Structures are given as structure tokens and as C-alpha cells.
Amino acid sequence: GQGTKYWAVLKKKRDEFIFRLNGIYKKNLSNDGVDLVEGRAKLIQDKKVEVNGVVYEGEHIVISVGGKPETLKVPGGTYSTSSDDFFKFENLPKKVGIIGAGYIAVELAGVLNKLGSETFLFIRKSEVLRNFDSIIQQSVTNELTKNGINLITNSIVKNITLNEKNLLKSIKIISNSNEIEFEGFNEIITAIGRVPLTSNIGLENVGVEVDVKGFVKVDKFQNTSVKGIYAVGDITTNGWELTPVAIASGRRLADRLFGGLPNARLDFDKIPSVVFSHPTVGSIGYSEQKAIEKFGNNVKVYNATFTDLYYSITEPQNRTKTWMKLVCVGENEKVIGLHVVGKGADEMIQGFGVAIKMGATKSDFDSCVAIHPTASEELVTMGKWGTIRGQPILPASY
């Protein structure tokens, strides 16, 4: 079918792009005078790293080894494949099972479903994206079902089996104390979290401390427990497993060590993030639940749900709603959380993220003239006017 043809084109172009990108990074390293040493590195003692039998010494050592997908530890778990192997599929699976409720699982389910795979998503609770605001959990969960994905909720995977005659796989789950078996999968993908690749790299040789899961303990400046050794990326205890966060923290670390900025560090508060689901999710700051837990009755929430004008002349069954939420706190209604589900949410959250990082209030949002027709105009016209009115305070040079 068309999906199979599109998959072949998508895979080919993606593989070519990654190959080209790897070459660009190697070329940039060379242009910047960086010596690239390929091999398995291991800390052997203070300020010393061994690679391929050669010892390298430096005043500063940065650990940024990344992570790998968590494996499914059930009988037959090896019959599943990880999210990292998604683009190794030579053919689009006719029927696919995905295990997980996080952003990777949701994104893969959306892609495969749109390409035409019969898609099943197995989640442990009743909703996906449980680390996000409730409006995101509820709306994305509903849209998954609306888009034709078979959402199997409250399911604990018991085992996976392989039919050696037709090479199709089956998943047996426990749901509400009942055992249920789902058969006929060409592929089963697990996306149940990631683990840091911090074992067997010599951390114990120099005394770098890790937590019980193997994440390297760092302070707000990316310092580990050993002077002169730093860690960045999704192997750290800062709680953010996102590539842009690793890049940003690495840049701040370089500024601090070599750029003459001794106090440079990444602010891990209010980091924007996106889930490329169908529709897209954009989120920054506190969820409503977390805000109430911390600030209690000082929290005020503004909500909006509407159909984007982009879909106004389409058939009703093809229309997708947009959901928005502002989470505010205090008398001046400082915006400490913004959550969007809908077309263009990814672009919206990057722009509004700047305002929220700068401490914008609900009245600051209200003072911005809406751009019509856009979905984002709803964020500056939402609900009642903010509690602080009057003219904005502008810089003297404005």
C-alpha cells in the first residue's frame, strides 16, 4: 500500500540525512581543531582517561555518554525491539504493538498509525504522558483513540511469545486482574524509559558518585563529586533527558571553564518541551497539579478549548481541537506554566517560553495585541483581564 511505499522513502531519506549529519559534525570538529579519538573510554585515575590502550590526561574531564532504552524484563522480552531500532525496520509492519506511555511511545504510535500500520499502544495507567499537565494527558489520550490507535489501558505486560511458523508475535497482558492475549504482531516496540550508560567507564576508579539508577550526581554547575570532572546530558540527576538541554548545559559549562564567565550555568527551571504527537504538544513550567501542590490556593488557572480556524472549512470528522492552559500564581498572576495541545503548539511554546522565562504575568499576555487568524491569539485573549492593569513599564530607552 501507500504506507509501505512512504516508509521506504522515509527510511532512505532519514538514513541519508543522519549519515550526512554525522559527517558534518566530524568536519566541524576538525575545523575547530578538535582531535577525535574513537573507542571505548575509561577513567583510570584522577585526570586520566584510557582509550584503546592510550592514556590521555587533562585538567577537565566531561562525562557525556548518553543513555540507552530500558529493556523489557519479562519472559520473551527479547522478542521486542527498542525505540532506537525503529528505523532499522526494512518494511512497514502491518501490525505493531508499542509498550509505553511516554513521549517516544506516543510519537511512534502516531507515525506508524498515519502510515497505515494497525497500531496497538499498551499503557500501564488510563492515560498517556503522565508527567505532563492533566489537559495534555486527557486530550492526547482521547486523540489517540480518535485517530484509530488501539489504546490498551491499565495493562501490565506478562510475556511475549513468537509463533515460529509465521514469525508473528503475541503479547499477554494483565488488565484489571484479567489475562488477555493479543496476537499477530509483526513487530513489538518497547519505549519504557532510558538508562544511563555509566557502567564500565571507570567512575568507581575516581570516586564519581551515582544514584541507585546509575545517574551521575551533579550540582547546578554540572560538577560531579570529583573536582575537575563534570557531567552533562541525560546521564545526570538534573531530571531532563532532552538533547537541547544537554547542548545548552554543555555550552554554559564551556563558558564557565574557558569563556571567562565563572557563574555561567543552565537554569533548569521552566524548560520548554514538545511532544510530536498528533496533534502536537507544547509545554513549559508547572502543571496545574504541581503548582497547587507547591503554592496551594494562590494558583489561578485559565483554560481554553476551541477548533482552530485552520480546520473551519473541513468536514467535522476531520477537525482537530486545540487545548490551552495558563497556570498563574500570586496576586500579580505570574505565569508559571503554559500548556498547548494542537496545530503549531511546538512553534508557540518556543516563543511564549521566552516570555515566561522573563517572568511575564497574565496582564503582560493581555497587553499583547492578538494576531488574527491564529491559534496563539487565544493565549493573549484568554478569560478575564489579568489583575494588574494599566500601561506597561518600558525601558527608558524604548
Image: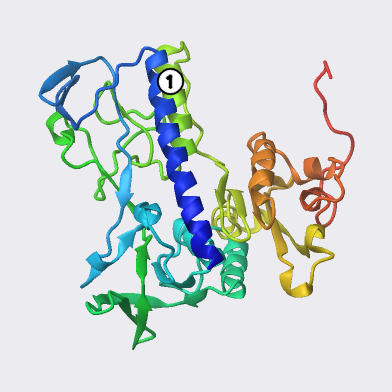
Q: Name the residue under label 1.
A: 28
Please state the horizontal and vertical placement of residue 254, each as a whole percent of the image: 42, 19
Q: Can residue 360 be seen in this view?
A: yes
Position of residue 54 relative to residue 367, above or below, is above
Please state the horizontal and vertical placement of residue 158, each as a whole percent of the image: 28, 77
Q: What element carries label 1?
A: helix
In which quadrant is the C terminus drawn? top right
Callout 1 amino acid: Asn
Q: Can residue 240 be seen in this view?
A: no
Position of residue 352 relative to residue 320, above or below, is above
Q: Which residue is drawn at 34% across and 34% down?
A: 218
Q: Residue at x 83, y 17 (%)?
A: 396
Q: How many marks?
A: 1
Please state the horizontal and vertical placement of residue 197, each as a whole percent of the image: 26, 43
13 horizontally vs 317: left or right: left
352 horizontally vs 147: left or right: right
Position of residue 212 relative to residue 266, above or below, is below
56 horizontally vs 104: left or right: left
Please state the horizontal and vertical placement of residue 162, each as a whole percent of the image: 25, 76
Which residue sits furthest right? 390
